[in-house]
Image: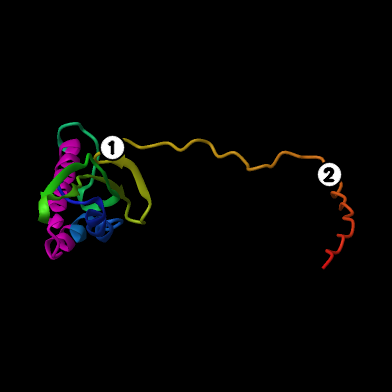
């Protein structure tokens, strides 16, 4: 999308963690230019979940979907030049955002189900305890004795 990632994040943060219907309503009434594109992306993710439930045989309940993950990352930057007074040129950068939305399904009691609409479940590496290596205690450093300075003659 031809919008800066910072502007896209403002809209994506509005829908993060919300149910799909609530997110669609929020995007419909948001007065940002990027909201229409995010709404199309959300609709595409809903359609992908619908495809998984009908064609692929996965058991996905569309009423229980929520926005699990919504990110706007940097894309390639287009560097442009605008003419300026007295033969100079002003350089500016046109930014591009890569938008990503992941939907997941919640149970009636609020627990997350293992399926996701746009990406497979991710596994975290096993947590290991944080331990510091043992070091030997050092003796405190001795102070050096400084001699008196000779006074300057006048």
Magenta stretch: includes residue 49 = yes
Find residue 134 and report its horizontal and vertical position in percent: 76, 40
Name the residue rendered at 87%, 51% in the picture: 144
Magenta-tinted stretch: 24-53
Disc on res. 138: 2
Most extreme residue toward the front is 154
Residue 62 seen in this snapshot: yes
Q: Residue 151, located in which quarter of the rendered image?
A: bottom right
Q: Nearer the viewer, residue 119 or 143?
A: 143
Q: Locate residue 87, reporting x and y percent.
A: 11, 50
The location of residue 94, given as percent across then percent down, is 17, 47
Query: From what the image shows, is residue 125 above or below residue 27?
Result: above
Seen from the viewer's position, the closer of residues 27 and 139 is 139
Residue at 25% across / 58% down in the picture? 15
In the foreground, 28 or 54: 28
Q: CA distance from mark 1 to mark 2?
A: 53 Å
Which residue is at the front of the view, 126 or 147? 147
Residue for badge 1: 119
Q: Main secondary structure of the magenta part?
A: helix
Residue at horizontal 55 percent and vertical 40 percent from the top: 127
Q: Quadrant location of residue 36?
A: bottom left
**Disc on res. 50:** none
């Amino acid at each position: 999308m031809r919008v800066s990632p910072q502007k896209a994040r403002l809209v994506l943060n509005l829908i993060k963690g919300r149910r799909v219907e609530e997110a669609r309503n929020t995007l419909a009434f948001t007065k940002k230019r990027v909201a229409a594109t995010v709404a199309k992306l959300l609709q595409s993710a809903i359609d992908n979940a619908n495809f998984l439930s009908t064609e692929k045989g996965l058991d996905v309940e569309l009423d229980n979907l929520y926005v699990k993950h919504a990110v706007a990352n940097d894309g390639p930057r287009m560097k442009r030049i605008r003419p300026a007074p007295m033969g100079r040129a002003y350089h500016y950068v046109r930014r591009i955002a890569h938008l990503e939305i992941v939907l997941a399904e919640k149970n009636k009691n609020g627990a997350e189900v293992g399926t996701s609409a746009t990406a497979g479940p991710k596994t975290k590496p096993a947590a290991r305890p944080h331990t510091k290596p043992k070091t030997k205690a050092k003796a405190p450093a001795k102070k050096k004795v400084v001699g008196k300075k000779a006074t300057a003659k006048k």
